Amino acid sequence: MKTADIIVLDFGSQYTQLIARRLRENGVYAELLPFNASISDIKAKSPKGIILSGGPASVYASDAYFCDDELFSLGLPILGICYGMQLIAHKFGASVVAASHKEYGKANLKFKKDHDLFKQTDDEQIVWMSHSDKVENLPDGFETIATSDNSPFCAFGNEKERIYALQFHPEVAHSHFGDKILKNFAKYICGCESTWNMGSFAKTQCETIKAKVGNDKVLCAVSGGVDSSVVAALLAHAVPQNLIVVFVDNGLLRTDEAKQVEATFKLKLGVDLISIDASKLFLERLEGVSDPEQKRKIIGNTFIEVFDKEAKKHENVKYLAQGTLYTDIIESSVVGSSKTIKSHHNVGGLPKDMKFELIEPLREIFKDEVRKLGIELGLSPDLVYRHPFPGPGLAIRIMGDVTKDRLELLRKADVILRDELKSSGWYNKTWQAFCVLLNVNSVGVMGDNRTYENAVCIRVVDASDGMTASFSRLPYDLLENISRRIINEVDGINRVVYDISSKPPATIEWE
């Protein structure tokens, strides 16, 4: 079992993995374990420190989450964040109650004393709050080290036991010195050195994959997107003789995407590719289905069915490799105690009786880290920096029924959007851009004639990891060109709208 400098115990916050990510960005390898991980599993990682994450529960409630009490007797530094802070207060005898005023958003943090946690940060700084409970008094042996206008115990600690607690979330970008605070905990309190990088991650993953696969075969599902391409490249480095790469055309791809995928893997990556056209099967399964969760599960089940059929043509296929990311895991709520947002086809959409064991080397990292890994593995920047494209494809960009005619409408609009963004230089300035075909018709007028046709929504967002996103402020002239071209060139569409919602509260994809 590989070691980790810092163990992050996950109590269900949507931002838990950001804690590990901020530390990794500073060269400190951090790894997640569930909040109820056994002490033996924690010791096996040989950590130098422990972080308790935030979470949706309340420590005084019947459904509260608690870690093993022995954790506090290991002699390791501990940092509690939000729920983790309240758990520490509760554990050491302080009172935690529902707050009369919930606190969400920015707050002004003020130091009460100099502390290693706040080295090389401003005396007053903006931090991000997200809590509905409060600590009423300090536990014995603890002292306040920072306050905010609404939180007299915004940060406190026990220097003798090396246990510290923060009411705010240092892991989110809204906390101005949050990454520095986490690095200070790792460096000055836990004694960690900055030695981890994406190269060491690639090496560790290759060693792990080799040990797991042995003499068996791995079936790697690729879509031509960044995630599956990076997984295929990683497997090609780790177990080249045991790798079977399969591309399934599910009929839900963008214009000419199947041809581009085949060219990428055969010509650019030098990987033998088995290409399967299963578009008819997928569209038959999706006929009459409008619920997005059902779409995702149907697509996930059908993928596995197709792969299973292909696997039977080969000997010793034991594993299925996927490009599952941490954002997929979080939104599908299969880590810790986080809440389900939507079932990703490669997570919540997988059948329970699946015959393969999964290999998911990217499940602990974010999209931007995947891109860095791709460059590390020698993939071309053109491939690595493509906009994300969802596994279920255009099925979740069509509101309502998925049909050949509606897919063709969406493909034509999508080509125009991407062409305009690339020709204007905006494609590489944005995180993701796509069209959504709405299940709404609207009245229009073309050449003095009344029309009653489809509406399309343009969705373009800025993000760094996909966990949060804001809509892109595209120039009006560019939006006008996109709208004009779609309406003029795509028969059946007479209205274009622009989505200006952010994530949260919306998600990036509509379904």
Image: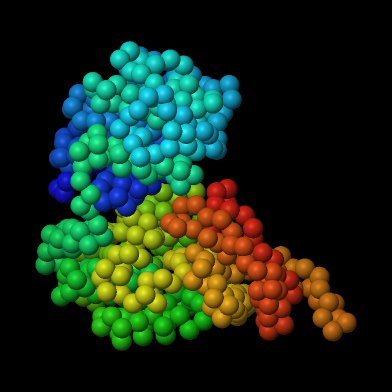
Q: Residue at x 17, y 70 (%)?
A: 239
Query: Residue 449 placed where, x, y %?
Result: 86, 81
- In this view, the residue in front, 93 or 302, is 93
Q: Which residue ends up furthest to the right in the rendered image?
A: 448
Q: Look at the picture and state if 384 lies above or below 5.
A: below
Quadrant position of residue 275: bottom left
Q: Residue at x 40, y 30 (%)?
A: 166
Does the rendering let one see residue 49? no
9 horizontally vs 216: left or right: right
Query: Residue 357 placed where, x, y %?
Result: 25, 58
Q: Look at the picture and state if 129 lies above or below 313.
A: above
- In this view, the residue in front, 147 or 273, is 147
Query: Residue 253 placed where, x, y %?
Result: 48, 75
Query: Residue 295 placed where, x, y %?
Result: 51, 61
Quadrant position of residue 215: bottom left
Q: Residue at x 37, y 44 (%)?
A: 179
Quadrant position of residue 14: top left
- In this view, the residue in front, 193 or 300, is 193
